[in-house]
Structures are given as structure tokens and as C-alpha cells.
Image (cartoon, rainbow, N blue to C red):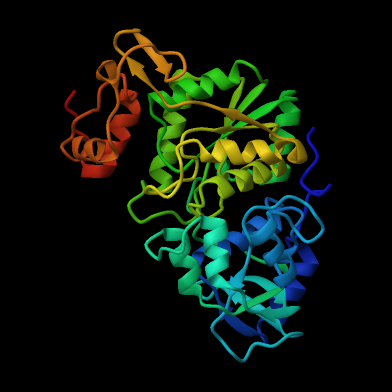
Amino acid sequence: MITPHGGSLVNRIAEGARKIELENKAAGLYKLEVEDRYTSDLLMIAIGGFSPLKGFMGKKDAESVINKMELADGLVWAIPVLLPVKDASIVVGQELALVDKNQTVIAIMNVSERFELDLDNYTTKVYKTNDGAHPGVKAVLDGGNQYIAGDIELLNRPVGENVQEQYKLDPAMSRAEFEKRGWKTVVAFQTRNPIHRAHEYLLKCALESVDGLFIHPLVGETKSDDVPAMTRMDCYQVLMDNYFNLKHTTLGVLPAAMRYAGPREAVQHMIIRKNYGCTHLIIGRDHAGVGNYYGTYEAQELVDTVADRLGIVPVKFEHTFYCKACGNMASTKTCPHTSEHHVMLSGTKVRDMLAASQRPPVEFSRPEVADILIAWATGKSTVTA
């Protein structure tokens, strides 16, 4: 099986007597409330999704990642994992109880460093813009320019991880599942949206050349107008049950927050899926993009520059769609026909149809998936074909 990034899978989850010890200690510690995106990072660190990280980065690693896309020791890393603070009283050497918005203690952290960064350089290098309208840039700017670093130990999983329990496959669990199934090669699919027919086509194309498919949707913090995680999970499951070979397909969630960092996030997604035991990752059109900040295939170009150093294979696809003239799913690489023959709908058009209890064309979306989305969009179960 593929080796975790950095050589070994990190586990920073306190259990048994150690958890009891830290829970007792937390009662007397200063409690620092952290936002959902950072509780997601705490979980990703603890379960090994961010291996080899054991905590939030210090300045040396952060600046190296920002400027050179690697950790200070030379290991490829694309997006800094940082904890901003606005409390000026926190000092190096202090032990903190990190709590969520419900005041539940998520983790204990030993503060090893306090520092500032050049935020303009940070956002321009990582997000390719310093525009505050970009959701990733906005999160950086909203956090301020005071950061603390230090190793963490997880006491409780964040309550924001609001999905069915059977889908919470941590890296050690997904690796065990792949091994049990005898999968030596596994392709992962990153998504934060329901899967439509074009996605289904590229998933099945990718699966033809590997042992297994890991549908791995991101369920951490996304944009406010994205479809909720629970609804999406129902969409993924009904699609799998009806249209995929379950002997070669499985489903689990990625509890990370979206950064919308486009090319850089594509590299980060490869690192994460490597830690989950995947040997391949699908990189499609505008991977992890938002708005018009990135080129259509810029993510594919960047992952090509580091794939050999990562050891996980990018599976690249052109834009896909249903072509009426071809009579099947196709891509810009395989279809000779002009766009008037292609069934393609904008996100706005799809939302309008769902709100009106109308299924999108079957060439665009499976009816079972459309029905779930209509029920979410309208609160009704009545569907018009």
C-alpha cells in the first residue's frame, strides 16, 4: 500500500487514560475558541489526514510552504495549516484548551511559537489573488495577522462533522478497508457537490484502470450556498446503489474545510488522499476553483510538476458532457461536435429547476439524485419529470 506522506501516518487522538488525564487538565486551562474551519484542521491533523503534521505550523514551515510549496525540510506541501489568534495574552510555552463554538474542548495545544506573516505575499502566492472577495483570501484576512504554532492532541471530534457515522472513514480506516478488499490501486474523487452525469462518466472511466474507486466528498466548511453535507451523502449513496459496482466502489467523507485555492488545493488534495491510502486522484476542470480566479486546467498543470515527488498519480480529464450527436457521454477531447449538441446547464439554471420541482434532463442528472435535491430545495416530495 502507498506510504503516507512523510513516511508514517500521524495519530494525535488522545484515548483511554490519556484522554481522561487531558480532560481533567483542560478544566484548568485557558480556553481559546476556534472557528469551524480550524476545528476541521484539528481533526485532520489528529487523524493523520495532514500527515506528517502534528500540529499547527510555525513561521519557518509556513513561509517555506507559501514561497516554495514545500515544508522547511523539503517535503511537498501546498497550503499552510495555521491557527490565527486575536488574543494578545497568549504566550509561548502556554498550554491551551481549544474549544468550538459550543465550548466543547476539541484539543489541547502547547504553544511553541507566536508570529506574523506577510499576508499580501501569503494570499498572492497561495490563492493567486489578494482580492478580499475570494472566500479563501477573506478567511485569511478575517483571521488577522497573529498566529500561534504547536502540537495538538485531540479529545473530541468536532460536532460540525454532521454526517452519518458509517461514512467517517479516517485514514487508518480507509487503508484497512482497501486492504480488506484487496485493492492495490485506488482512485479518489474530490467533490463538494452532488455528482451529475458528467462526473459519473469520468469516475467510471477512471475506475476502469484501477482496483477501486473512493468517492471522497469534502464535508468541512464550504460556501454558504453549497448543498448541505447530509443531503449530498444521500445523493452519493443512491447513485452508488443504482449505478456503480459496489464491489469496486466505496464512500467516505473528508472532514477538511474548503480553501478554494485552485491549483494549490489540487496538490493539497493529492497529499491528503495519499494519506488516506489512495494511489490516484481525479483532477478535473477547475479543480477546487471559485469564480474566475484560475485557469480551466491550471490545477492539472501544477500537479504535474510535483506528482513524481508525491508518488500519487493525477488522473486528468477534460470537460465532460452528454453529446446528443454522439449519443453518449463525451469530453472535449473525444467529441467532434459543436456545443449546441452538448447538454450543459449552469448552476443557476439547475437550482431554478430544482426550486420549481423540475428534474434536470436525464442526460445531465440521474432522476434519483434529482429527486433528493428537489426535496432539499423545496421541502416537498412531489416531482415533475
Determine whether 20 is above or below 199 in the image. below
Q: Position of residue 374 (x, y in %)?
A: 25, 37
Quadrant placement of the N terminus: top right
Picture residue at 54% right of the left edge, 40% below the top: 299
Residue 1 falls left or right of residue 235: right
Q: Quadrant of residue 47?
A: bottom right
Residue 301 visible, this angle: yes
Residue 209 falls left or right of residue 18: left
Quadrant placement of the C terminus: top left
Picture residue at 38% right of the left edge, 48% below the top: 228
Residue 333 falls left or right of residue 311: left
Q: Position of residue 110 (x, y in %)?
A: 74, 77
Determine whether 46 is above or below 369 in the image. below
Q: Number of callouts in the render?
A: 0
Q: Position of residue 260 (x, y in %)?
A: 48, 52
Picture residue at 26% right of the left edge, 39% below the top: 375
Residue 245 visible, this angle: no
The residue lying toward the viewer, choosing from 4 and 356, is 4
The residue lying toward the viewer, choosing from 113 and 369, is 113
The residue lying toward the viewer, choosing from 115 and 251, is 115
Determine whether 172 is above or below 22 in the image. above
